[in-house]
Image (cartoon, rainbow, N blue to C red):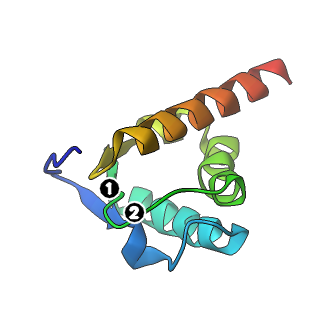
Amino acid sequence: MSNVASDGVVLNISDITPGTYSNVDGLTLLIAIKNAFDNQAEYVTLSLQGVIGFSSSFLNSSLGTLYEEMGIAGFKRIRLVNYKPAQLVQLKKYMTDVVQLHKAE
């Protein structure tokens, strides 16, 4: 697990949304990320403490929509902490797939 301290905004996903499985949960996180971006010049840290896993609906409504709206610049402004190795693998694969999908369009 990573426990890197952040100098900016830290969003604990489990404090923002009750789950990481539905579109509503994903949209709730997306809104929190966008609000944090509005108040933070550089990056926003997402803490995965207490998060067990992610559904594709959650990821599509949060990170997928973030990419559609902000492109790779949105992804580059996110830092992750308090994650398990399997979570990091899943998120990296998802983000890579989203970028590749949009390049093909």
Please give the residue where the numbered disc 2 appears in the rendered image.
36
Q: Residues within 10 Å of mark 1 (few under 14, many from 20)?
A: few
Q: Which residue is depicted at the point 44% across and 76% down? A: 16
> Left or right of 21: which side holds 82?
left
Q: Position of residue 97 (x, y in %)?
A: 67, 29
User: Image height check: is 16 above or below 37?
Assistant: below
User: Image height check: is 97 above or below 13?
Assistant: above
Image quarter where the C terminus lies is top right
Q: Which residue is depicted at the point 72% across and 58% down? A: 57
> Left or right of 73: which side holds 2?
left
Q: Residues within 10 Å of mark 2 (few under 14, many from 20)?
A: some
Mark 2 is on which residue type? Ala
Mark 1 is on which residue type? Gln
Q: Which residue is depicted at the point 51% across and 57% down? A: 53
Which one is nearer the viewer's eye here, 51 or 33? 51
Snapshot quadrant of residue 49:
bottom left
Q: Position of residue 9 (x, y in %)?
A: 27, 60
Snapshot quadrant of residue 19:
bottom right
Please give the residue where the numbered disc 1 appears in the rendered image.
40
